[in-house]
Image (tube, grey):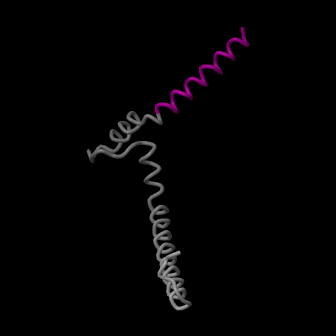
Amino acid sequence: MSNTIHDINSLDKKIQSLKARQKDIEFRLDENLQNLKANYFGMTINSFFGRKKKQKGDFWGDMAGRFMESEKLQAGIGNFVEKMANKLGDFFQGKQ
């Protein structure tokens, strides 16, 4: 504790100060959570596809470019193709 507390009055003032600080922190936390809720979808899209670099006006071309630039998407497609190739290989080995 702080060494400014010497009597019951200074203790009460410190308690009131800490309660006010607590309310301020709770208010800022609530604001931050509201901002997170409001921006979560956009942040998720940006983290998956990458941030949009500039507005070209060609929506489908821009989306195709974002798909092609996305390392996460490329890794996911690579994993999917690898699993499908393994399953097809197992299927054909079982047939022959």
| Horizontal side of residue 85 vs 95, given as left or right | left
72 or 54, which lies in front?
72
Q: Residue at x 49, y 76 (%)?
A: 2
The answer to whether 8 is drawn above or below residue 83 in the figure is below
When asked about the image quadrant of residue 86, the answer is: top right
4 vs 65: above or below: below
Which one is in front, 53 or 25?
25
Residue 6 image offset from top left, x and y in percent: 52, 86
Question: In the image, is 65 to the left or to the right of 75?
Answer: left
Of 93 and 24, nearer the camera is 24
Chief secondary structure of the magenta portion = helix
* Residue that sits furthest to the bottom in the current view: 9
The quadrant in which the C terminus is found is top right
Instruction: Tell me where residue 74 appears, x and y as whole percent.
Output: 46, 31
* Number of numbered markers: 0
Determine the residue located farthest toward the top in the rendered image. Answer: 96
Place of residue 14 in the rendered image (x, y in percent of width and height, measured from the top left): 50, 83
Residue drawn at x 52%, y 91% is 9
Residue 15's image quarter? bottom right
Query: Which residues, given as a range, are shown in magenta?
Result: 74-96
Measuring 49% from the left and 31% from the top, which residue is drawn there?
Answer: 75
Q: Nearer the viewer, residue 61 or 21?
A: 21
Q: Does the magenta run of residues contain 26?
A: no
Residue 63, percent across and down? 37, 41
Q: Is residue 24 left or right of residue 57?
A: right
